[in-house]
Amino acid sequence: MEEEDLAPVLSAEANASMGLPRKKSTFDLEEATEAILKYKGVFELTSMRKVAEREKQFSEQEQKLRARMIKVRHKIAVISGKGGVGKSTVAVNLAVAFAMHGHAEHIGILDADIHGPSIPRMLGLTGQRLQVGPPGAFPASGTLGIKVVSMDFLLPDENAPVIWRGPLKMTAIRQFLSDIVWGELDILLIDLPPGTGDEPLSIAQLLPEMDGVVIVTIPSKVSQVVVKKSVTFARQLGMPIIGVIENMSGFICPHCGKKSDIFESGGGHKIAEELNIAFLGSIPIDQEICEDADRGEPFIVEHPNSAASKSFMEIVKKIEDFLRQKAKK
Ligand SMILES: Nc1ncnc2c1ncn2[C@@H]1O[C@H](COP(=O)(O)OP(=O)(O)OP(=O)(O)O)[C@@H](O)[C@H]1O
Ligand SMILES: [Mg+2]
């Protein structure tokens, strides 16, 4: 076919795509304009419908989130500036300490560390799956009825990475709060990854009623400097600061009883004073904390008389005082 012969075919196809009769081979400006406007109108209507649908879904989910979260009396997030300072360890042991302190069956942990969830392993819940029923998905249940939700329960195996950007992570956290049947809880502890990125920001935005944050640090100067970032982050987002916990605060040798300040000690206290926030207590380095976490056995239950367990129980009392004071205001 010659090039000229093709012209009517092409313009007929162009017409057809704009909603004009396929037969037409001549260009009519008025009709073309009308078709374009019609197409634009349909496109705008479709986009508007999509936006409206998305807004409806969003507001339904927001309502669901509020309905679920109203049944959770207190929400506390565990944050830190640096990684590996013991946030998850603190979250798990505080949850167990609260459960032992009269709140059994009424404590929840939201593992909001999307990329590095570690709560299931520490509570012996690795390999669990969320059970889904008509009202939503149910959390896994651990020691003393602690309810746990973690990304880990959705992954094919413990080694599978989550390769997500911020908005997807926020969607997942929103669903963890809105689609999970948490039930009536006294306290929901939220374990976060280190720093001031997407996950803590999502939690701050989704739970504006949060009671406060617990900041975990180790005594070294390097960690203290970053604590200031966490404090500024919490203050800027209007999240009350419950206080600082100094983890890995000295090591008492089980053989000779001598204390070694591996990461120095007293730094948490100093930084709390400097930043005018409460100091909640120090947790020593204890080999059993690490070994119990790896075995999935809650340290406080296994070693209730250790210095670290006593310290966790004292910290729980201080947090309860904070919550009582806050309720009075
Ligand atoms: N006081 C302690 N004594 C002994 N080991 C501890 C102590 N605190 C934490 N650990 C161990 O240190 C390691 C890191 O702790 P954990 O995972 O709780 O830190 P994290 O701050 O949550 O880390 P991430 O920033 O990666 O989330 C774990 O193996 C844990 O068992
Ligand atoms: Mg952690």
Image: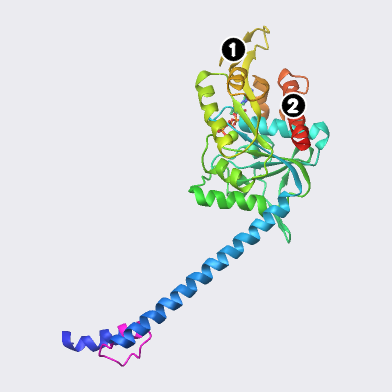
Q: Is 41 inside the magenta-drawn segment?
A: no
| Identity, as a three-letter code, of the amino acid under mark 1 | Asp
Give the image quadrant in which the ligand numbered 1 is located.
top right
Give the magenta range.
14-28
Res. 256 image quadrant: top right
Q: How many marks?
A: 2
SS of the residue under disc 1: loop
Residue 244, given in percent of the width and then of the height, sits at 63, 26
CB of mark 2 near ligand 1 (< 8 Å) = no
Residue displayed at 29% across by 92% down: 24
Magenta span includes 21: yes
| Circle 1 Cα neighbour tier, 10 Å, few/some/many (<14 / 14–19 / ≥20) | some
In this picture, residue 255 sits left or right of residue 198: right
Q: Residue at x 67, y 9 (%)?
A: 255
Task: Name the residue tied to disc 2.
Answer: 318
Quarter residue 26 falls in = bottom left
Q: Which residue is mark 1?
A: 261
What is the three-letter code of the residue carrying label 2?
A: Lys
Mark 2 or mark 1: which comes first in sequence?
Answer: 1
Quadrant of the snapshot with the C terminus: top right
